[in-house]
Image (cartoon, helix red, strand yellow):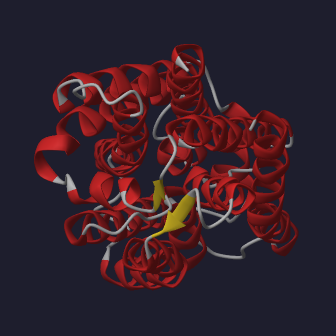
Amino acid sequence: MTMTVHLARLLVLAVIFVNGWTDAPGAIATAVGSGALSFRRGVVLAAAFNFAGAALACLCFPAVADTMGELVAFHDPRSACAALNAALLSIVLWAVAAWRFGLPTSESHALLAGLSGGAAALGAGTASLSPGAWLRALAGLALSLPAGVLAGRLLRRTISDRVCRPDSWQRGAAALTALLHGVQDGQKFLALLLLTHGLEGAQPAPRLELALLTAGVMALGTALGGRPIVEKMGSELASLSPADGLAADLGAGAVLLACSALGLPASTTHAKVAAICGAGRGADRRVMGQMAGAWILTFPACGGMAFLLTRLMS
């Protein structure tokens, strides 16, 4: 039992690392795409503000972690380890496969799918889903796309091109997006770390200590790259002027901030891509189709892998 719990903790850290590697770079995509930031400077900025957001989120927006922690109730610790390990492994495999093609995936959707597949494999007597927590999670994820498009479009109409010429505006907006990514996704994976610490019936580690660990691992993943995703979102998805990029960053930030305040887990990837489409011009339908296809396949792919891996492990 102890070994499987340690494996679960390592896999949570692996997912946090992959999230920083594949998801967080989207925060700087528009600033890099418009030339306001070089890729290297953008990565440093994203890593720093992801760390800050993930570290501070436990004090400012703990409801997101609470919602994620309530999604599934496991009635047997040994089975819980098997399902959790299967879900986490499916997320890592899916995220790395999507990164290979430069596609930004939503680890939020992958996490929901993996937990669902693991719980289904265990059966109703061993795991149960919380309808209220699932409704909050699905509401946040479902709102990310339309709210992102609307926010990006409205802000683009109100932002003057003159105001956006200084690169500092875009750098500030990219920092804000990275900070809010840390707030959202840091809380989701903090909930998993808290869950693993409770599997053996021991007292959980201090919340702030685990939040700092989450922030550090996420920042490390961000610092190691994500260039294909930055290029896909910042240069290939739509034509972006500095004003477009600023509107997209602020629009995505507004969606993430609202969802965090309401305790709704939101998809940073969906909010940012939607805001780019709302604020930019001439969105590339081919790139949009590739991203949409990856998102649609996330649930069956991660859910199916988690289901099969849980059956093998339990």
**Res 159 quadrant in image:** bottom left
The image quadrant of residue 214 is: top left
Q: Nearer the viewer, residue 196 or 178?
A: 196
Q: Could you say where residue 81 lies in the image, as x and y percent from the top left?
A: 58, 35
How many numbered circles are shown?
0
242 or 17, nearer to the observer: 17
Q: In the rendered image of this protein, does residue 128 appear above or below residue 38?
A: below
Left or right of 263? Residue 32 is right
Query: Percent position (x, y) of residue 69?
Result: 37, 53
| Residue at the image position 62 percent from the left and 24 percent from the top | 225
Percent of width and height locating residue 104: 68, 50
Is 298 placed left or right of 11 in the picture? Answer: right
The residue lying toward the viewer, choosing from 186 and 236, is: 186
Q: Give the residue drawn at x 56%, y 27%.
A: 8
Q: In which quadrant will I find the C terminus?
A: top right
The image position of residue 106, as x and y in percent, is 61, 55
Residue at screen point 34% across, 69% down: 264
Is 263 placed left or right of 243 in the picture?
Answer: left
Q: Residue at x 66, y 37 (%)?
A: 82
233 vs 260: above or below: above
